[in-house]
Image (spheres, helix red, strand yellow):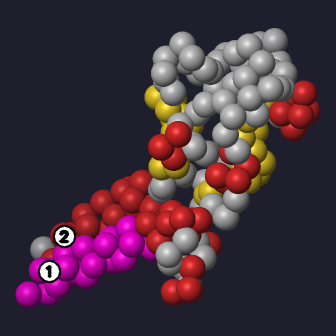
Amino acid sequence: MASSNLYIILVTLAIFAPSVLATDYVVGDDKGWTINFDYQAWAQGKSFYVGDNLVFNYPKGAHTVLKVNGTGFQQCAAPLDSVPLTSGKDVINLATPGRKWYICGLGQHCELGNQKLLITVLPSSSSSAPSPSPSSWPSKASAATITVGTRFALMMLLTIGFLGMLVA
């Protein structure tokens, strides 16, 4: 009986662990996806991992989000077959590691308003998340890392609690 309960708990943890460790990054924080904002400065110091999400918040109709390649990023031009995201609450799952480029496709928001974002996505955080050092805790740049660590600690405490119930 105890071994079947343990099996159920382990399977449940295996299913939900990636979503517990994932981080939602609101692009631009409280400013959202807008013109005249330095998105490269916003991204600097953040660690994006496979499984994390980018959340683009903006007034519907005011902007778009287009995924482009490096050339499209530099030229502020999307391929002709690109389908823009336009909901105003667009969520992009970072499913693969590597460089990712995003621009706004409306007017000259990218060219003149600097509405573009370049990030590098690292392999899954469950295997390679860096531990935050106490000296970096106060900075905004490390907030996402702390969140990942906190979520992982919570998951481990829950696992230990479940295992303790099985043994008792």
Residue 71 circle label: none
What amino acid is found at the position of numbered circle 2 in the picture?
Asn
User: Dot 1: what SS?
Assistant: helix
Residue at the image position 12 percent from the left and 74 percent from the top = 1
Residue 25 seen: yes
Q: Is residue 62 inside the magenta stretch?
A: no
Residue at the image position 67 percent from the left and 40 percent from the top = 37
What amino acid is found at the position of numbered circle 1 in the picture?
Leu
User: Dot 2: what SS?
Assistant: helix
Q: Counting other residues with Cα less than 10 Å from the Cα at mark 2, is it few (<14), some (14-19), or many (20 or more)?
A: some
Q: If the image is split into quadrants, where does the C terminus sit?
A: bottom left
* Range drawn in magenta: 149-168
Q: In the displayed structure, would residue 52 be above or below residue 37?
A: below
Q: Is residue 152 inside the magenta stretch?
A: yes
Residue 166 circle label: 1
Residue holding disc 2: 5
* Residue 155 percent location from the top left of the image: 33, 71
Residue at the image position 76 percent from the left and 34 percent from the top = 114
Q: Main secondary structure of the magenta part?
A: helix
Q: Which sits earlier in the primary sequence, circle 1 or circle 2? A: 2
